[in-house]
Amino acid sequence: MHDDAPGLFELGAVKQTFGRFEPARLTQARVRTGVSKTDLATEVGVSAAAIGQYEAGVNSPRVDVLDRLAKVLDVHPSFFGAGRPLARIDTVHAHFRSLRSARVSERQRALATATLMWELTFVLERHVKLPEVDLPVIPAGTPPSDAAALLRHHWGLPRGPVRHLVATAESHGIVVAVRPLGEIDSVDAFSVVILDRPILVTTPRRSENVFRHRFSIAHEIGHLLLHSDSSEYSAALENEADEFAAAFLTPATDMDSSLPQRLDLATLDRIGRTWGVSPHSLIRRMVERGRTTESSARRAYQRLTMTEDPTADPTSAYPGEVPTLLKKAAELAADYGAGAPVIADALKISPRQVRDLLGEVDRRPRLRLIDGG
């Protein structure tokens, strides 16, 4: 079998190798694919009630139904087997930096992706020692700005800009991933902790602009430190994470010596490129530091909206903002005989899906056939 094939076994092999059915695996695969129970039932040829019973553990699918489920959900039939480490999506709590339109189903899909990312990390750690998680314990009630200063001290960061935020986070054990919008449509970024491993997931809506990307990553780190005991969304928690991100990326003492005395957009653009933050963030910092008024800030935001080029992105100046931890771990594992097929076998998905989770771009030329008839 080609290692990029869907990976379906012959039914006889399923009978021989498949053990006890794990209902949560079906839920994970279905939710991550974005398929409703009704639509999955139609594709598989059973009732929606039957799918519900499978996921509730009331009944287990027959081998032929299991095979059809695997085909529709693009996994191996053995993906549904019990016995492998599994983070159930109904037990994982996340902090979402999301659009107002994000539905519960879309957040659940994001969680299903995070659980699979964690499984990939778990499998890679069988072959490669990843950086230990290194986050300080922040006492309850610590102001976000103080927490940001504590993290800078804990990580030994020098004064000034955080040059490579994602690389720094990864070097301290935080897994960072960028997932496509087609997979997570209405969620900008989110963070979870599964068995003590923090995972931050962002989307191109944030990562295509390096300033938004960096702020989102810092925002999610703020949630990890400040709100580890809370899984509820609230504007207050989001504001605290924003305050943490601003203080971490642009500490007040540094801003007092760096910000101009009067609001000047050209100067803020130059400062922003040095610090890796947007002019919008610096305008907000000027208000907070008493350098300008709210009314002046609103006028500046309006001018930025009229003059900024949404396609302009100095990402190339920030090479340390592209996640590489899992990809480098996979390359090292492959050097020791555990390439994509081995990792895929452990996860019960195809090597193609493993490479996608690692963020590898398929650069093979696409064959297009023209109908000559």
Image: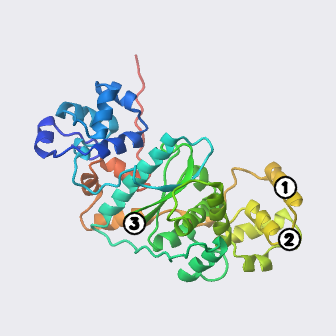
Rendered position, 225 above or below 190: below
Q: CA distance from mark 2 to mark 1?
A: 14 Å
Going by the numbered disc 3, the residue's amino acid type is Lys
Which of disc 1 and disc 2 is earlier in sequence? 2
User: Where is residue 264 shown, x and y percent of the image?
Assistant: 86, 65
x and y percent of residue 137 in the render? Answer: 50, 76
Residue lying at 47% horizontally and 69% vertically, measured from the top left: 170
State the quadrant of the N terminus: top left
Q: Quadrant of residue 25?
A: top left
Q: Is residue 105 left or right of residue 265?
A: left
Q: Residue furthest top?
A: 373
Kindly identify the amino acid type of the residue bearing the numbered disc 1.
Answer: Arg
Dot 3 falls on a residue whose secondary structure is helix
Residue located 83% across and 51% down the image: 302
Residue tagged 1:
298
Identified at 40% across, 67% down, the residue is: 196
Distance from Cα at disc 3 to Cα at disc 2? 44 Å
Which element carries disc 1, helix, strand or loop? helix
Residue at 32% across, 39% down:
74
Instruction: Say which of marks 1 and 3 sits in front.
Output: 1
Q: Amino acid at mark 2?
A: Arg
Whether residue 320 is visible to the viewer of this picture, yes or no, is: no
Q: Is residue 191 left or right of residue 97?
A: left
Among the two numbered marks 3 and 2 on one chain, the one whose residue lies closer to the N terminus: 2
